[in-house]
Structures are given as structure tokens and as C-alpha cells.
Image (cartoon, grey):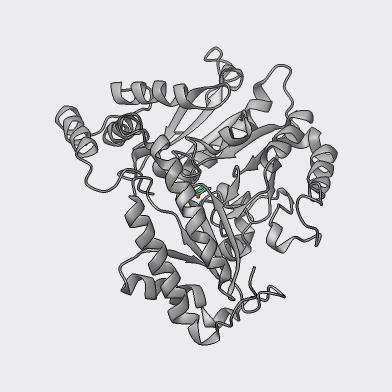
């Protein structure tokens, strides 16, 4: 989740300076200058009407907070709608490994063993276009898969607290990039049926998709947004849940009314982590990180073209700097390799021998470079990835049909 590179002096110095002031002080009933300043900066860059910040320390916690906030909001809004207690999410979603976050997740492998701990939710199939469950193809399908989403949300609107979604791309599922307009369409469905929209920007936030937040691609204005991972530039554990004034106000009242949002972790909003986050935001400005990123995204797209010629590369998905390369046994039928062959794991290990760290997710290779990578390094990363695929699968690589 590194953003600006390792050993950035600006971030190191900010952490050391903070250490000279105070290493930790609680946010339970108190605050500190770095937390205040960071909240202000986050609100400035956040999409839509987000204007309040609740800190925590991991992405999963940021999502738990989002769920609890949405649930309690409906009990305390005016007039209260206490029947709105359920959540909707998409199959293949990933929101973290704690019980609530797992409950709204949709990757069977990660949660099978804990099934009895999880609360029931509503879930519809998403837009995994390469393996479309409707056997349709975009754009001719005109989002036929959204019918199921809309139907389910419409039918249960009275009991739905929120729709939960990773915007633009499902990361942990294997970099499943939705077709253009899909995220916005789901947001509009939620709005139409008066269901809150929670975006999980833990993976996509802080430039990974080419904009500061993935919501910006389609002008989405979420009610709640979870942030983590890149928030400190990848230096220290910190997360945040942002929400709107409207939701915040539902938690105000007299002591007797007991509208408090009862959630707090001991190390919530740790000052060292906040200092690192502030330095990281400064670097976004100083280095013009997002501007510098655009030609690198274009280069990445261009370089990925040649991977398409490989007969065992089935699909290549890219959203900014988030890339998934799906390996298949048969390109025509899209047949997967037998799991025991662990092809992506073997490719990954080969790449490591050649000096590059990439990650496998089942048979999908994940390429997600730090934003600060140079064009030269990007070239090396892709060369090694390409050569590693050829080296491991070479014997079974057939000449692909010319495009
Ligand atoms: C990584 C991730 C999380 C969980 O964050 P942690 O800090 O690992 O708890 C939640 N949602 C998404 C989309 C993620 O990619």
C-alpha cells in the first residue's frame, strides 16, 4: 500500500517531529492537533458532502464503523426508521476480515469457516464481465445484471440500511473492474430507494485508480466512505470513516437521549499515524503525484497490450494503477487451471526470484505499483512479470491467434 516510496524523508521527519511532541494520546473524549488538521484536509479532498471524520486503525474497523453508523442513523433520524437494519452488497466483495466486514463480504473462500458468526445480508451478483453470469457482453448487455440489483434493493428498501460497495473495482476478488457507469448506476439505485450508500475506498483511495478517490470517476457522492491502506502513504496503521452532516446530526442530542456513537479503539487516530498521513497529503501536492501518474497509467496500459498475445492470459483488467492479469488454461473456453497447479503462485515466486514482488489471487496476478514508481521501474516490473509467466507456463504456451 506504499504510495510515495520507502524512506521518504518528508514522512520520516513528520513522524519524528510528532514523536518529539507526543507519541499517543486518546481520542476518547479528547483530540490532538494532528487529528484535527488531518480531518480538515480529508474533508477538503473528499467527494460530495462528506464533512465529518471518525478515525480508527484498520480498513476493516473503518468498515465496521460505517455499518454501525448507518444502522444507528436510521434509529435516530427524524422520523426514525428502525426497521432499516439490513445491508446489501455484491458477490465477490471484500471489506475486511472482522465479523461485520466479513458479513458484507462476498468471497466464499475467506468466510466459509466463520459462516455461523456472520449476520445475514442481501447480496446480488456483480459485474464480473469476463465471466458474466448472464453470458452477455458489455456494452450490448446495457447492464442487464443491474436488474437483479435494482429488484432486490427495491423490494427490500424498507428494511435496507445501506448498500455497501467497492467503487470502480473489486480488489481482493481479483481486480474485477466494473464497466464504465456501473458504480454510478448502483449509487443511483440506492438513492432512488432511500438507502444509504457506503463506499469502501480502503483499496482504491489515495490515487490507486488515477484519481484521489475512485468515486471521482463517476461523480459519486457517498453517504459514508471508508479509508485505510494508503492514507499514511503506507507507513503506519490508520483508517477513517467519513460521513455527511446529515448523518452526523442524528448523533447529537442531550445526555438523556443517549445518541452517542459507541465505538472507540485505544489507538484510534494515533498521532504518529496522523502525522504520517498529513506528510503524505503534502507529498501529493509537492510531487504533483496525481498529475505525474497519468502518463504512467497510459504507459502501463500500453505495456499490458503484449500480455494479451499470450495464449494463457485470459483477461487483463486495469483501473489506473490497479491491474489484474487472469491466467486461464484455455483462452477460447476461459477454462481455469486446476487449483492444485497453483499457476499464479508459481509465477509470483518466479518474479520474486527475478527481483519483483507481485501477488497472486487464485489464478489472477495482481500488479499494483506504488504511485511513485518511475517509468523505467514500471518497464522492469512488467518485463519481469511477462518473463515470469513465460518461464513458468512456457511449455504450455501456444501461439495465440493474431489479434
Ligand atoms: C484491504 C481492504 C480492507 C481491509 O483493510 P485492513 O486494513 O486490511 O483491515 C477493506 N476493504 C477493502 C476494499 C480492502 O481492499
| Residue reaching furthest to the left | 20
> Which residue corresponds to the image point at 56% horizontal and 62% vertical from the top-left?
110
Looking at the image, which residue sits at the far top? Answer: 254
Q: Is residue 191 visible?
A: yes
The front one of 213 and 108 is 213
**Which corner quadrant holds the C terminus?**
bottom right
Given residues 295 and 164, the one toward you in this image is 295
Percent from the top left, x then y, of residue 172?
54, 56
Residue 85 visible in the picture? no
- Identify which residue, 400 or 190, lies in the foreground: 400
What is the count of numbered marks?
0
Q: Farthest residue to the bottom: give it.
A: 395
At horizontal 38% and vertical 59% (from top left) the residue drawn is: 379
Residue 173 left/right relative to 61: right
The picture places residue 207, in percent across and down from the top left corner, at: 45, 40
Q: Is residue 269 left or right of residue 322?
A: left
- The spot of residue 203 in percent (x, y) is 49, 46
Question: Which residue is at a point 52% across and 50% down the rendered structure image?
Answer: 96
Q: Horizontally, is 169 left or right of 130 in the view? A: left
Q: Picture quarter containing residue 109?
A: bottom right
Nearer to the camera, 243 or 373: 373
Image coordinates of residue 11 in percent, x first then y, are 24, 37
Q: Residue at x 32, y 32 (%)?
A: 274
Q: Compared to 97, does 10 lie above or below?
A: above
Q: Is residue 163 left or right of residue 376?
A: right
Amino acid at each position: 500500500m506504499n504510495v510515495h516510496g520507502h524512506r521518504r524523508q518528508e514522512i520520516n521527519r513528520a513522524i519524528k517531529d510528532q514523536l518529539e511532541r507526543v507519541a499517543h494520546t486518546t481520542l476518547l473524549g479528547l483530540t490532538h492537533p494532528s487529528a484535527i488538521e488531518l480531518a480538515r484536509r480529508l474533508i477538503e479532498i473528499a467527494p460530495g458532502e462528506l464533512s465529518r471524520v471518525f478515525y480508527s486503525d484498520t480498513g476493516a474497523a473503518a468498515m465496521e464503523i460505517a455499518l454501525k453508523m448507518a444502522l444507528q442513523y436510521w434509529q435516530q433520524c427524524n422520523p426514525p426508521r428502525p426497521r432499516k437494519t439490513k445491508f446489501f452488497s455484491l458477490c465477490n466483495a471484500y471489506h475486511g476480515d472482522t465479523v461485520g466486514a466479513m458479513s458484507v463480504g462476498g468471497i466464499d473462500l475467506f468466510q466459509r469457516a466463520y459462516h455461523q458468526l456472520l449476520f445475514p445480508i442481501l447480496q446480488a451478483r456483480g459485474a464480473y464481465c469476463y465471466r458474466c453470469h448472464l453470458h452477455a457482453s458489455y456494452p450490448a448487455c446495457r447492464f442487464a445484471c443491474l436488474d437483479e440489483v435494482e429488484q432486490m434493493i427495491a423490494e427490500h428498501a424498507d428494511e435496507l440500511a445501506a448498500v455497501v460497495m467497492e467503487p470502480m473495482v473489486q480488489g481482493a476478488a481479483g481486480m474485477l473492474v466494473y464497466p464504465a457507469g456501473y458504480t454510478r448506476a448502483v449509487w443511483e439505485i440506492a438513492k432512488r430507494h432511500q438507502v444509504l450508500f457506503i463506499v469502501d475506498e480502503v483499496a482504491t483511495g489515495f490515487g490507486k485508480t488515477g484519481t484521489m478517490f475512485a468515486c471521482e470517476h463517476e461523480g459519486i457522492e457517498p453517504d459514508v466512505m471508508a479509508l485505510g491502506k494508503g492514507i499514511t502513504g503506507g507507513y503506519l496503521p490508520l483508517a477513517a470513516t467519513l460521513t455527511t452532516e446529515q448523518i452526523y446530526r442524528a448523533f447529537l442530542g442531550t445526555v438523556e437521549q443517549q445518541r452517542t456513537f459507541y465505538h472507540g479503539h485505544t489507538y484510534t487516530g494515533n498521532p504518529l499515524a496522523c502525522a504520517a498521513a498529513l506528510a503524505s497529503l503534502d507529498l501529493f501536492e509537492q510531487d504533483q503525484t496525481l498529475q505525474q501518474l497519468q502518463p504512467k497509467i497510459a504507459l502501463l496500459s500500453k505495456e499490458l497490450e503484449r500480455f494479451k498475445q499470450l495464449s494463457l492470459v485470459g483477461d487483463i483488467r486495469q483501473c489506473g494503477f490497479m491491474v489484474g492479469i487472469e491466467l486461464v488454461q484455455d483462452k477460447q473456453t476461459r477454462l481455469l487451471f486446476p487449483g492444485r497447479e497453483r499457476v499464479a503462485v508459481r509465477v509470483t515466486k518466479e518474479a520474486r526470484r527475478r527481483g519483483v514482488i507481485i501477488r497472486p489471487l487464485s489464478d489472477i496476478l495482481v500488479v499494483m505499483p506504488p504511485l511513485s514508481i518511475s517509468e523505467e521501474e514500471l518497464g522492469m516490473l512488467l518485463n519481469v512479470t511477462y518473463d515470469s509467466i513465460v518461464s513458468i507456463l512456457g511449455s504450455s504456451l501456444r501461439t495465440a491467434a493474431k489479434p
